[in-house]
Image: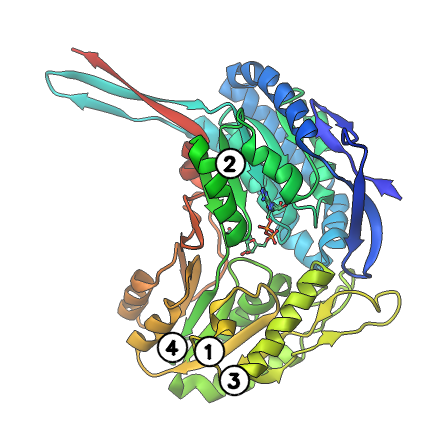
């Protein structure tokens, strides 16, 4: 059985404890590799290496740093097939999705920040007759990046790339549920000529190695993406240590559809925004609100198309949905479907596990599920399910739609469908969310601020926001 390894000080190494745990393949439910069960000892070793590397990496010219990161980006691109296959196997997502979204985006993340850093300017404030202020922006030092399982390399690189570009040395931990592509990244870092100790990748559980990263006194900033409960714990732990924190957390996004929208475009996009990656994208719209005159037409077309969406093993080119990420997650999603029924919901399609033929008979497959008839206040409509389950609810007025959309503790993203320009602006403006798409979904420009409000997080990633997060500003005043 293949044993994954940590990547510390530029080389692959086993965890100090020599302990491992199982890595499951969601498509089959079988164990296919072993994950290092790292702990504080591994974090100590990684921090030592990172501290030593920091003067070298932060002292390098921007051009040199940028070139190395461009090579890292190209290194992933050159190994596209290997990364695509690994991501799909580790996560259960259709290979086509990993090939079109996950891995190309990891390539772009490194390329984007490798070049963005060349244009990152700091401010100067001139005071007439008094003097001039100028602000320097220096890397923080050793920083921690902790990422989730839904878009493994995509989100891992979304944090690591700006941290490195800004001149920091990184202790990174991918999710223990999907460690494989982060494991492969070590090789690419070596080939790209990243100096040893600049990027250290540790595997293991959140409670053990993740916690050790959050608590390590020499790790000065934590960039975290994951669940709201974990984010709350991290804030409680790292806050009193005065660490810089960026928290990208859960969501329960609303998709508001007005009767005057472009129906076909809306329908096709709504199918994606509901079920792409088996609904396991933090930006998926899981609560769909439809203006009443369109409700029946939408419901009929939506149910008809979704019930034909093929759930299949990830390598099947016809698969629209693959496996969800783990057995426990599958059970959680199925339990929410049961809850929805108890709360009075009617399952219009799906609502059950899907059993494929051997060798996939034990894989974690769920039919895409549409539920109607629920109150917007019920648990199914308030709590994050993070699977292929959506609810549909009619509304009569714009105010009612906004009231229901804004009723959860979350505020990550929202989608508005209308051809009325004034209404589009008004509704987008009044949605409690960090990101809103009008007549679109998941169009991403890496320069834009990314993040949520309320329990969906604190801080913003993307573009200058990320480079600002990973640097410390110092203002210097000179009297004229
Ligand atoms: P999770 O919170 O369980 O784990 C995320 C990461 O944190 C993993 O690497 C995990 O090992 C680590 N971790 C867990 N406990 C920890 C601790 N005590 N200390 C330090 N690290 C710890 O989340 P998940 O189940 O992997 O991911 C799903 C969640 O992520 C969903 O809630 C989803 O909405 C959210 N998410 C948010 C965004 C966003 O941008 N806002 C993007 C993707 C996913």
Determine which residue is flagged by label 1: 263
Q: Secondary structure at mark 2?
A: strand
Q: Which mark is residue 400?
A: none
Q: Is residue 149 above or below residue 477?
A: below
How far apart marks 1 and 3 lie (CA) works out to: 12 Å
Residue 172 horizontal side relative to residue 180, left or right: left
How far apart marks 3 and 2 lie (CA) works out to: 43 Å
Residue plotted at (44% across, 69% down)? 255
Q: Secondary structure at mark 1?
A: helix
Badge 1 density bin: few <14, some 14–19, many ≥20, Cα 10 Å:
some
Q: Secondary structure at mark 4?
A: loop
Question: Which mark is first along the chain, 1 or 4?
Answer: 4
Q: Which mark is residue 258?
A: 4
Residue plotted at (41% across, 29% down)? 120
Question: Which mark is first along the chain, 2 or 3?
Answer: 2
Question: Which mark is first along the chain, 3 or 4?
Answer: 4
How far apart marks 4 and 1 lie (CA) works out to: 10 Å
Residue 266 horizontal side relative to residue 430, left or right: right
Determine which residue is flagged by label 2: 222
Residue in front for this viewpoint, 480 or 254: 254
Q: Nearer the viewer, mark 4 or mark 2?
A: 2
Determine which residue is flagged by label 3: 299
How far apart marks 2 and 1 lie (CA) works out to: 43 Å
Going by the picture, which residue comes out furthest to the top?
Answer: 480
Q: Nearer the viewer, mark 3 or mark 2?
A: 2
Q: Is residue 143 above or below residue 443?
A: above
Say whether mark 2 is within 8 Å of ligand 1: no
Residue plotted at (66% across, 35% down)? 74
Task: Classify residue 187 by image quadrant.
Answer: top right
Mark 4 and mark 1 in contact? Answer it, CB < 8 Å: no
Residue plotted at (30% across, 80% down)? 397
How far apart marks 4 and 2 lie (CA) works out to: 40 Å
């Amino acid at each position: 059985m293949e044993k994954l390894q940590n990547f510390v000080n530029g080389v692959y190494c086993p965890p100090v404890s020599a302990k491992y745990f199982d890595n499951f393949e969601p498509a089959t439910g079988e164990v296919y590799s072993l994950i290092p069960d790292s702990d504080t000892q591994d974090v100590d070793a990684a921090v030592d290496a990172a501290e030593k590397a920091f003067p070298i990496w932060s002292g390098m010219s921007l051009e040199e740093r940028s070139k190395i990161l461009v090579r890292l980006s190209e290194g992933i691109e050159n190994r596209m097939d290997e990364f695509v296959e690994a991501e799909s196997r580790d996560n259960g997502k259709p290979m086509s999705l990993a090939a079109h979204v996950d891995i190309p985006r990891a390539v772009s993340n490194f390329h984007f920040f490798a070049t963005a850093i060349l244009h990152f300017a700091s401010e100067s404030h001139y005071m007439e007759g008094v003097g001039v202020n100028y602000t320097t922006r220096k890397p923080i030092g050793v920083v921690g990046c902790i990422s989730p399982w839904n878009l493994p390399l995509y989100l891992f690189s979304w944090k690591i790339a700006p941290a490195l570009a800004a001149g920091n040395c990184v202790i990174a931990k991918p999710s223990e549920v999907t460690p494989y592509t982060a494991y492969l990244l070590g090789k690419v870092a070596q080939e790209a000529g990243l100096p040893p100790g600049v990027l250290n990748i540790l595997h293991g559980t959140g409670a053990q190695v993740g916690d050790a990263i959050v608590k390590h006194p020499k790790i000065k900033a934590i960039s975290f993406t994951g669940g709201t409960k974990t984010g709350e714990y991290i804030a409680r732990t790292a806050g009193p240590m005065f660490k810089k924190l960026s928290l990208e957390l859960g969501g329960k996004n609303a998709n508001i559809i007005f009767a005057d929208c472009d129906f076909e475009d809306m329908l096709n996009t709504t199918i994606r925004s509901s079920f792409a990656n088996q609904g396991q994208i933090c930006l998926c719209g899981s609560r769909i609100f439809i203006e009443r005159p369109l409700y029946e037409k939408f419901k009929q077309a939506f149910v008809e198309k979704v019930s034909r969406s093929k759930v299949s093993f990830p390598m099947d080119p016809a698969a629209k949905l693959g496996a969800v990420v783990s057995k426990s997650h599958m059970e959680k999603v199925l339990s929410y479907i049961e809850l929805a029924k108890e709360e009075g919901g009617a399952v219009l399609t799906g609502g059950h596990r899907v059993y494929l033929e051997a060798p996939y008979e034990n894989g974690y497959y769920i039919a895409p599920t549409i539920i109607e008839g629920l109150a917007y206040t019920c648990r199914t409509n308030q709590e994050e399910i993070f699977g292929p389950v959506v609810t549909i609810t009619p509304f009569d007025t714009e105010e009612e739609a906004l009231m229901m959309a804004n009723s959860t503790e979350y505020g990550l993203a929202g989608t508005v469908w209308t051809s009325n320009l004034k209404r589009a602006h008004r509704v987008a403006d009044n949605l409690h969310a960090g990101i809103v798409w009008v007549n679109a979904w998941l169009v991403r420009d890496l320069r834009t601020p990314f993040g949520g409000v309320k329990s969906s997080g604190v801080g913003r990633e993307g573009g200058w926001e990320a480079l600002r997060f990973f640097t410390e500003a110092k203002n210097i005043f000179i009297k004229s």
